[in-house]
């Protein structure tokens, strides 16, 4: 699979004929005779090749006048893995659009965050995706609207504004145009609603590309959970979320074919962003087949991949939060890092009400932490300097960590901070910034695994050997870590 797959007609036709779900989200099939567009795995009889046109995005299909298929629901496909494995302008723009930036700040805000002109951003998105930022954001609003229509009992007016539409008329017109049904017709056709129907409480299904191994993914999140902010309860990972319009509490539960997601939001306008961040946290838009095929080419990694394929990289819902926690975890145990973070949360986090109990705070912002007295930090003076410098740079805006971050540039900025070595910069790149090729050759767990497997164990030699694993070295880290008996590698009981 590669960039611009929709231009390879022969390959797309093969994928459609085989109903291969691995390609869902990579491209969309528009059918000229019916005027609808589908995901490659649509269960209906495939149309004739001459009646198929392939598009790189749902927005492109909608721009061309096609409606979403009612059988395969292409708007619910996993997102394209391209945006998580690339660091160019288009990929960074797509990550920001998924995070709701166009709805909140408009196209000028999107362009400003990327450091390009509005015209440059629009031109590049149109060239690669067949749609500009407004059309892409509109397609996302339509998907959010459908989700609210089908899973809640909210009045349609509230659905419209929660999904980001400026008016009820625009909401009605968009839903009819995209789905060929009115909002009320969509609701009447939806299956019985699950979960609570009270405003702000939603039960959703987050799709992913199979296989997905939940062990290290949820094991890592549970083992490093900060009390008050995160917990593992009744088979679910739960945490608080700081969102643009308010806050939320999410419970994520692994199942064989999807991730069950329960969201409680103080403001429904945050729904799209909350879903995007949960998907990012669990790396749900990854392409595990492509990753595992590459890593299997190494005879040492192949048995690890075959034993438990589909490992994901546990990421983060807040990049600045993770950076703070990475510093707190320097040269201490997982338990000690949790203790340090819990103290900060109790003293400086914003209190929240959890109807289920257990969660008490949002993780404190850099601006709040910048006001604390460094002498109150129970850590060595050198690490205290590292911590306060990071907080100050984040609070002042001199250092920005976000979904749009340029990975090499940000890594260089991190390495320039006092007390930041390769391990801290690379673990932030891997888990907070989402770089799929970030590597941790100095990590003790990685070096121990390498030694036990007969791989080079010195950082330089291991880095040289790992060149064959590119561009998926962050996933190789997960397979190497999994050779150890640490709790991060096991789904909690």
Image (spheres, rainbow, N blue to C red):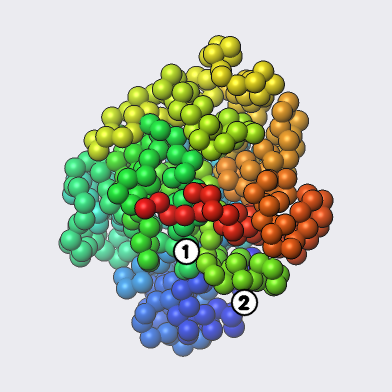
Nearest to the observer: residue 188 or residue 328: 328
Task: Residue 332 in the image: state x and y as whole percent.
Answer: 60, 33
The disc, 2 or 1, on the residue closer to the chain's N-terminal end is 2
Nearest to the observer: residue 24 or residue 325: 325
Q: Going 53% across and 49% down the picture, which residue do you hit?
A: 486
Q: CA distance from mark 2 to mark 1?
A: 27 Å
Asked if residue 226 is positioned above or below residue 205 in the image, the reply reads above
Count every numbered label the image shows and give the total.
2
Secondary structure of residue under mark 1:
loop
Nearest to the observer: residue 8 or residue 300: 300
The mark lying in front, picked from 2 and 1, is 1
Q: Quadrant of residue 295?
A: bottom right
Task: Residue 223 in the image: state x and y as whole percent.
Answer: 47, 44
Q: Residues within 10 Å of mark 2 (few under 14, many from 20)?
A: few
Q: Quadrant of the N terminus?
A: bottom right
Asked if residue 394 is positioned above or below residue 184 in the image, the reply reads above
Task: Residue 269 in the image: state x and y as whole percent.
Answer: 35, 40
Task: Residue 272 in the image: state x and y as whole percent.
Answer: 40, 46
Residue 164 falls left or right of residue 342 = left
Q: Going 66% across and 67% down the picture, which residue do you hit?
A: 301
Q: Residues within 10 Å of mark 1 (few under 14, many from 20)?
A: many
Q: Are marks 2 and 1 in contact (CB under 8 Å)?
A: no
The reply to whether residue 227 is in sight is yes
Secondary structure of residue under mark 2:
loop
Q: Going 54% across and 13% down the picture, which residue do you hit?
A: 376
Q: Quadrant of residue 479?
A: bottom right
Give the residue at mark 1. Answer: 212
Most distant residue in the bottom direction: 48
Residue 8's disc is: 2
Q: Going 40% across and 51% down the picture, which residue do you hit?
A: 492
Residue 310's disc is: none
Residue 469 falls left or right of residue 128 = right
């Amino acid at each position: 699979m590669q960039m611009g797959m929709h231009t390879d007609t022969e390959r797309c036709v093969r994928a459609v004929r085989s109903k291969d779900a691995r390609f869902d989200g990579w491209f969309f099939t528009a059918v000229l005779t019916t005027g609808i567009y589908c995901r490659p795995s649509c269960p209906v009889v495939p149309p004739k090749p001459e009646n198929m046109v392939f598009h790189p995005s749902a927005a492109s299909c909608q721009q061309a006048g096609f409606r979403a298929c009612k059988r395969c629901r292409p708007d619910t496909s996993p997102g394209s893995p391209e945006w998580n494995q690339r660091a160019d302008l288009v990929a960074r723009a797509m990550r920001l659009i998924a995070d709701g930036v166009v709805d909140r700040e408009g196209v000028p805000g999107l362009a400003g965050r990327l450091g390009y002109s509005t015209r440059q951003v629009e031109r590049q998105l149109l060239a690669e995706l067949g749609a500009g930022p407004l059309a892409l954001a509109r397609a996302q609003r339509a998907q959010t609207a459908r989700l609210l229509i089908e899973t809640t009992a909210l009045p349609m007016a509230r659905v419209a504004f929660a999904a980001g539409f400026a008016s009820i008329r625009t909401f009605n017109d968009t839903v009819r145009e995209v789905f060929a049904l009115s909002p009320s017709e969509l609701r009447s056709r939806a299956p019985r609603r699950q979960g609570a129907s009270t405003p702000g409480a939603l039960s959703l299904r987050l799709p992913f590309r199979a296989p997905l191994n939940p062990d290290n993914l949820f094991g890592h999140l549970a083992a490093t959970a900060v009390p008050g902010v995160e917990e593992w309860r009744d088979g679910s990972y739960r945490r608080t979320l700081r969102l643009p319009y308010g806050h939320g509490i999410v419970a994520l539960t692994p199942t064989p074919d999807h991730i069950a997601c329960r969201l409680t939001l103080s403001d429904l306008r945050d729904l799209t962003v909350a879903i995007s961040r949960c998907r990012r946290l669990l790396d749900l838009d990854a392409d595990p087949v492509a990753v595992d095929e590459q890593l299997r080419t190494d005879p040492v990694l192949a048995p690890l991949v075959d034993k438990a394929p589909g490992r994901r990289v546990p990421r983060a819902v807040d990049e600045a939060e993770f950076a703070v926690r990475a510093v707190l975890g320097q040269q201490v145990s997982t338990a000690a890092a949790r203790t340090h973070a819990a103290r900060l949360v109790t003293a400086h986090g914003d209190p929240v009400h959890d109807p289920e109990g257990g969660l008490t705070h949002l993780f404190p912002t850099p601006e709040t932490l910048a006001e604390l007295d460094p002498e109150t930090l129970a850590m060595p003076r050198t690490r205290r300097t590292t911590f306060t410098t990071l907080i100050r740079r984040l609070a002042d805006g001199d250092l920005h960590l976000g979904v749009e971050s340029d990975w090499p540039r940000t890594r260089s900025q991190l390495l320039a901070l006092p007390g930041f070595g390769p391990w801290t910069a690379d673990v932030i790149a891997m888990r907070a910034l989402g770089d799929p090729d970030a590597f941790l050759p100095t990590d003790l767990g990685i070096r121990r695994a390498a030694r036990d497997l007969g791989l080079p164990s010195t950082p330089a030699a291991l880095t040289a050997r790992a060149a064959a694993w590119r561009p998926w070295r962050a996933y190789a880290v997960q397979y190497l870590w999994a050779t150890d008996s640490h709790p991060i590698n096991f789904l909690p009981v």
